[in-house]
Image: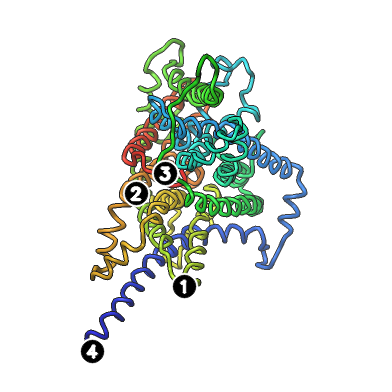
Amino acid sequence: MVRARAPWRGRLGRGAAWGLAAAVPLVFLGVFFAWPVVTLVARGFVGDDGGLDLSGFAEVFSQPRTWRILGLTLWQAVLGTAFSVLLGVPGAYVLYRCRFPGRRVVRALVTVPFVLPTVVVGVAFRSLLVQGGPLGFLRLDETFAAIVVALVFFNYSVVVRTVGGLWEHLDPRAEQAARALGATPWRAFRTVTLPALTPAIASAASIVFLFCATAFGVVLVLGGIRYGTIETEIWIQTTQFLDLRTAAVLSVVQLVVVAAALMVANRTRAKRERALNLSSSASSAHPLRLWRDGRPTGDLAPAALTAVVVVVLVGLPLGTLVVRSFRVPGGGWGLDNYANLGTTGGRNALSVTVWEAAGNSLRTAALATVLAVVIGGLVALVVSRRPRSRGGRRAISVLDSVFMLPLGVSAVTVGFGFLLTLDRPLGLDVDLRTSGLLVPIAQAVVAIPLVVRTVLPTLRAIDPRLREAAATLGAAPGRVFRTVDGPIAARSLGLAVGFAFAVSLGEFGATSFLARPDSATLPVVIFRLIGRPGAENYGMALAASVVLALLTAAVMLLAERLRGDRPGGEF
């Protein structure tokens, strides 16, 4: 009897453990993501009497301003995506297909903009393009072109990392065969390599389009009300006009846009994973050669373009930000702006000092990272399983898509939904809107998809026979995880921790809604300093942006170092 019950109890225990591992993330995202977002969407369809009312849509879409904002949102996303791809594909070739001294440093440098807070990116470009700045003669300050260039700066690394990760492991023999048959380098690339890279390029373009369409801090700092997008318009309607109905309708419109982009991204991601199965695991990078026998090689053009992008597009804004942070308000150079970080700014522009805000940011990001890694780690563990039944595989696929939804919903929408729903969550007599826990929870919701996409590819690469062998030898599920999954996934988990911490540190969209004046974070105080008049406040904003940029860059460089040369996730 005892021997007969043991396998049954074992299966029941494993089933309960996997059920709990799936239930915890589902409950967390159900309460802190789905409920606020669904409630927000419902505001656009429900009238004051509780019945279905679509008059809000008719009212909003009858205004020319709505169509202008929708057009600007789509146009900036299309241009930002097109230029990111055109510049990013040559960069992926140089940084992942060619070997040269300092390649790892350049890779880390082009990654820094992606993890920089959007407010810092906006301040960096404004200091570059403002009258008296290095590129002030171009008269691009507060123009649509400045927003597009800043979006390309922000998303360049997404294309480089996504396409380069595949290109690095692409089998070179097919292209070599085409060259041996007489094809020119360009024709071999166009007919052999480019088709193989197309799924990765399309996947990167979909993600960049998503990020450009939901950009907030960059547009708010560089464009203001004149070049607003759906994301900034939701923020303005909520915080300045208190028009929740219009904000809800615009949120529904944005959900439609990002849902379409997510569908394209999911389809292209699946194609990319099938392509990876056909690639060689060995790196096929060759030494970078610009000249051969006195003639330029095929590496010269992409290397020159990448050098210009790294120096002008990436290095110049960051360098200008650092240099101008040492320009003192009365003229000349010094450390006055950094010394003022211990004050509340000119005319008490802030309720806390910048250093106190930095402490708030670090504490909030640490708590958000713990939440994101625990929830995201459980999600990655569950969806990395490979059930034998067709129904099980379909359930895993659905769960994978559900857990990625926060990646496609803007942080502003999440923060807005929190304000509408979390006054008495689940009937509990507690107002979470006044709790200090709300900001780290919102930041964790934003960071969870990045954790999943960083850890999941590694877990899926583990041979399931290793787990089956350990279980056959009598190891319990917990021991199988500690001895098989844990050691292999440890480095990817370190990178995920870095991503979650850096993203939480610079998160601005949801935090701008939820942070209390006495617990403001660094991105929030930077934005407040920019909006207040006075050279002292602007100088403090530049110095605080440098501090925040250094913090996020240090976190990501440490995380990249922990990962080493191992292929990681999609970011």
Residue 399 got which mark? none
Q: Earlier in the sequence, mark 2 or mark 3?
A: 2
Q: Earlier in the sequence, mark 3 or mark 1?
A: 1
Quadrant (top left, top right, bottom left, bottom right) of the N terminus: bottom left
Q: Amino acid at mark 3?
A: Ser
Q: Give the CA distance from mark 3 to mark 4.
A: 54 Å
Q: Amino acid at mark 1?
A: Ser
* Residue position marked by numbered label 1 in the rendering: 389
Residue at image coords 46%, 41%: 165
Above or below, 292 against 10 in this view is above
**Camera-nearest residue between 420 and 445:** 445
- The secondary element bearing badge 2 is classed as helix
Q: Earlier in the sequence, mark 2 or mark 1?
A: 1
| Residue 313: image location, x then y, percent | 53, 25
* Residue position marked by numbered label 3 in the rendering: 504
- Examine the image and state in which quarter residue 554 appears: top left
Q: Earlier in the sequence, mark 1 or mark 4?
A: 4
Q: Is residue 442 left or right of residue 75?
A: left
- The secondary element bearing badge 3 is classed as helix
**Camera-nearest residue between 500 and 340:** 500
Above or below, 311 against 388 in this view is above
